[in-house]
């Protein structure tokens, strides 16, 4: 019998639909997991962490089964100010029952698989309507996170998966409007990680594009924002 499964999930934007998409994903995983395998859900940011802005935290009408744990990283549409105080704690932080925030640069191991978690991305200028609601200073990938990630990867050994919000600059991405995504500072920093780590798989979101490809030996995928998941059973 398998030990468990790891599920990679794209953008959720929980408050936008009062967590309905997330509720549906959890329900679908539960329905398909008849054996109730231990399940680790790795969510790529834009989860919907707005504890000081909206009245939609914690997630409403979502029951996480006892055999499931959810680990999310910060996206540009999570409250970076509120998450900053947890960045140096060195371990996942359980915000509500079985839902954990993972600080940038941590490597966690599940079922013998090592996963690097590294959040952050830049909000497009066209979406920056209101500071503290639509975007935050400090939302981007930063050098401190990169140093922590590289140090932790050196200690951990070969990395099987990377989960980020945006992606390295060498990944050729077409966004949800059919436009090729340009390079920026966040992507260049993640490129430094990619060139050192070279994982088997790299999952991310942000562009809502459901695109995928292969760069070098790494298979990568933008998981989009429609509840699409990638499941690995071990």
Image (cartoon, helix red, strand yellow):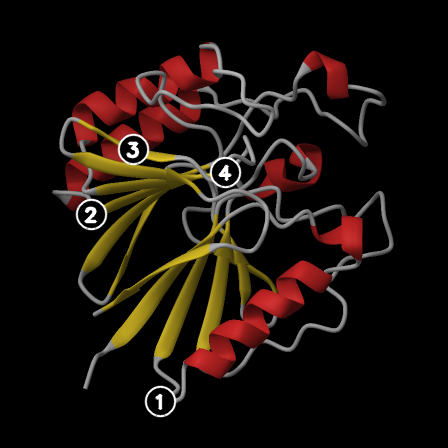
- Classed neighbour count for the residue bearing mark 1: other residues with Cα under 10 Å, few (<14), some (14–19), many (≥20): few
Q: Is residue 146 above or below residue 12?
A: above
Decide: marks 1, 3 in contact (CB < 8 A)? no
- The residue that appears at 48% across and 10% down in the rendered structure is 182
**The C terminus, quarter of image:** bottom left
The disc, 1 or 4, on the residue closer to the chain's N-terminal end is 1
First of labels 3, 2 by sequence position: 2
Asked if the residue under mark 2 is in contact with the one under mark 4, i.e. CB atoms within 8 Å, the reply is no
Q: Residues within 10 Å of mark 4 (few under 14, many from 20)?
A: many
Q: Secondary structure at mark 3?
A: strand
Question: Label 2, label 1: how many angstroms apart (C-alpha)?
Answer: 25 Å
Query: Measured from the top left, where is residue 145 in percent x and y?
Result: 41, 28
Question: In the displayed structure, does residue 210 sit left or right of residue 191?
Answer: right
Q: Are marks 1 and 4 in contact (CB under 8 Å)?
A: no
Residue for point 81% across, 22% down: 131
**According to the image, label 1 marks what residue?**
35
Nearest the eye: 141 or 45: 45
Give the x, y percent position of residue 172.
Answer: 36, 20
* In this rendering, the label closer to the viewer, 1 or 3: 3
In-image side of 220 versus 126 (left or right): left
Mark 2 neighbour class, 10 Å CA radius: few under 14, some 14 to 19, many 20 or more: some
**Real-space CA distance between mark 3 and mark 2, rounded to the nearest whole angstrom:** 17 Å
User: Residue visible at 47% across and 40% down?
Assistant: 210
Q: Quadrant of residue 75?
A: top right
Residue identifier under label 3: 213
């Amino acid at each position: 019998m398998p030990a468990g499964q790891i599920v990679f999930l794209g953008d959720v934007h929980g408050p936008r639909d009062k967590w309905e998409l997330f509720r549906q994903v959890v329900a679908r995983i539960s329905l398909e997991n008849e054996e109730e395998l231990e399940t680790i859900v790795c969510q790529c940011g834009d989860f919907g962490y707005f504890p000081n802005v909206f009245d939609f935290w914690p997630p409403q009408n979502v029951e996480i089964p006892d055999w499931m744990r959810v680990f999310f990283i910060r996206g540009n549409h999570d409250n970076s100010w509120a998450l900053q105080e947890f960045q140096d704690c060195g371990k996942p932080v359980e915000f509500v029952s079985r839902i954990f925030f993972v600080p940038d640069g941590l490597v966690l191991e599940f079922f013998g698989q090592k996963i690097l978690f590294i959040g952050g991305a830049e909000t497009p200028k066209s979406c920056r309507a209101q500071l503290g609601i639509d975007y935050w200073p400090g939302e981007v990938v930063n050098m401190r996170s990169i140093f922590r990630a590289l140090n932790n990867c050196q200690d951990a050994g070969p990395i099987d998966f990377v989960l980020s919000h945006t992606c390295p600059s060498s990944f050729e991405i077409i966004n949800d409007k059919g436009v090729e995504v340009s390079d920026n500072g966040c992507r260049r920093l993640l490129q430094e990680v990619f060139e050192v780590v070279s994982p088997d798989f790299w999952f991310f979101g942000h562009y809502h594009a459901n695109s995928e490809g292969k760069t070098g030996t790494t298979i990568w995928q933008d998981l989009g924002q429609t509840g699409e998941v990638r499941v690995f059973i071990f």
